Each structure stands twice: as C-alpha cells, then as structure tokens.
Image: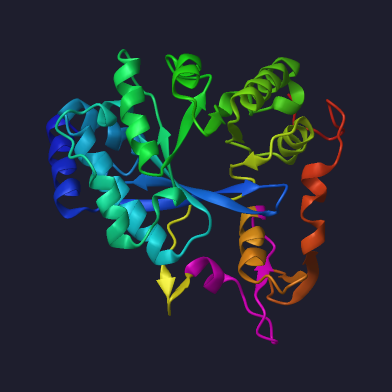
Amino acid sequence: MTVAEQLTALGAILAQRSIHSLFQPIIQLSERRIHGHEALTRGPSNSPLHSPLNLFAIARQAGRLTELEAACRESACRRFSEQQLDGKLFLNISPESLLEPHYPSGRTLKLLEQVGLEPGRVVIELTEQTPTDDFQLLSNALHHYRDMGFSIALDDLGAGYSSLRLWSELRPEYVKIDRHFIDGIHCDPLKREFVGSILQIARASKAQVIAEGIELAEELAVLTEMGVDLVQGYLLGRPQELGLRDGQPVLAQVMPVASGGQPTVGLNASLGQIMELFGRHEHLDSLEVLGVDGRPCGLVYRNALPVLASSRVNPLPQGNHCP
C-alpha cells in the first residue's frame, strides 16, 4: 500500500470513526480484583491500518495525530461506559497531543460528562514516541488534568527518551515498567535489580507500579515476590473488544452458565476473566470449570486465586522457560 493510499485510508477511518476500542485488564493481586482497564485501539479489520503501529505512524506523518487520538479517546470512553467495566480507565495520550496549541481545552472533561464517567476514574497514560523538549509546558498541561480530577500514568518506563526525567518532573500516580524488563525476569538477575530499583523510587514518590507484558506464570510469581501488586499481560487477560448483549457485557455472556444459573468458566479462561467474574458475583465462593465437551471438570475457588501470585519461588524455578 502506497503512502497516498494509506493517507486516504486514514482519512476514511477518521471521517467514519471506524476505530475499535479494546480493553485489557489491570489486576490488583492483593485485593484479587480488577483495578482498571487500558484502552487500546485498532483500525478496521480489513484495512492495512488495522495495526496500531501503522495507524498511528501514518497519522503522525500526516499531521493528524491529535485528531486520531481524540477519536480514540471518544471511542474508548463511550465503550467503557456502555460496558460498565470495573475500575479505572487508562487512556493513552502522547505529549505531542497534550502540547498541541489548537487542541480545545476541556474537551475530554466534556466527553466524560456526556458518557457519565467521573474524572477520578480516568488515568491519562502518557506515551512517549518522540523526544520531549519542553518539560515545563508538559508539566503545566498535566497539572491542568490533575486539577480536574484525573490521575497520571507514565507508560513504558525505561524505554522512552526521557522517562526517568519525566517521572521526576511529573510525579505521576502510576508508572508502567516497559515489558522488556518483565520478559524473562525470572531468568535475569539484572532485570530484577532494575525492577527492584523502580519499586524503591516508587515508594519514595508514592507512585503505584504496574508491570505490563506478563506472559508466564514464572514472571508473575517473581514480580509478586518482589512486591509488585498491579499487573497486566496476556497471562492475565488479552485485549478484547467487548460488547453488550441484553444489557450485559459479552465477557459474562460467553461464559457457559451452569444448570443452577451460576456463571462458569472454560478451560481457557484467563486469570483476569476469572477475577472479573468473581468481582461481578461477590456471593460466589467458587466457579465451576467446564471442559471442551461442556461438562463440569473442576472448580476454581475464590480464596485460591492469590496462591500462584504469592507463592515463593527460587530465582530459577524448576521447569522454567529460560533459554
């Protein structure tokens, strides 16, 4: 696809608002509940701009990044509210958009009023793809959001151009450790030292640390042993484009229902999905697990959820996935 064709496709996506909002859960292990959801964007499934990397790259090239991000925020806020998702909504915003002089002030707050969301439930997640030069102007912009009740998160800590200085200057409520430092952390002492240092700084600055990109149980166990409480990744739940059926989230609908009318889970249910169901059905002490034939094959107990995360492991556990 030529650049001209990509620009045409981008124009059609923005005109038709044909973007899709996916939500990935952020789990709070100590409370055994969903702390929030990060909103992620995809283009139309039949488009070469389906990938967010391609979509945002061409928008930046065309000078329409702010317009695209505004459309993404609108879609995410509306879908989050419609689906009545639990916890906080994490919205990705680039410094470029925050510093855009022509961006209408108060637009995000007005959108939240329209969909019935309180600013206290929204976290502005700062994503840095290009160098940030004017720290003072960026700080002023984020303080403006804080004054309206929003929280601030710094994304991909350790991977950006100036993420440590941004942390020092902005004092965000959340810092998200770049997935590079999470991948294989159970096999890499240096990565554990890095995460340990981040946790020390976070305690001093009163920031909450989120470890993202968790794909292995060994990674989760090591991070929990180190004191990381907020976690995100495919192991806990993949980004999903959830909808509504009969006024209920599809996530709860697609789970088979036992004869007694209680929700059940399939063998491929993620930890995040299980936690969400327990959160929605607080009276349940257990969930029935159905096999591939649709018949009960076991139970998941509410009080057993933290066992995996809180179990103590050796630095190099037996049967690990280390190369």
Residue 218, x across and y down, in percent = 76, 36
Count of picture labels: 0
Residue 45, x across and y down, in percent = 32, 51
Is residue 264 covered in magenta? yes
* Residue under the point 44% across and 49% down: 120
Quadrant position of residue 68: top left
Answer whether residue 289 is visible to the viewer in this image.
yes
Is residue 19 covered in magenta? no
* Residue under the point 47% across and 29% down: 154
Outermost residue toward the bottom in this view: 260
Residue 298, x across and y down, in percent = 80, 69
User: Toward the viewer: 82 or 308?
Assistant: 82
Relative to 159, residue 304 above or below: below
Relative to 44, residue 81 above or below: below
Where are the magenta residues, as a range?
A: 250-271
| Image side of residue 236 versus residue 254, left or right | right
| Image side of residue 95 versus residue 155, left or right | left
| Image side of residue 222 versus residue 170, left or right | right
* Residue under the point 64% across and 64% down: 279
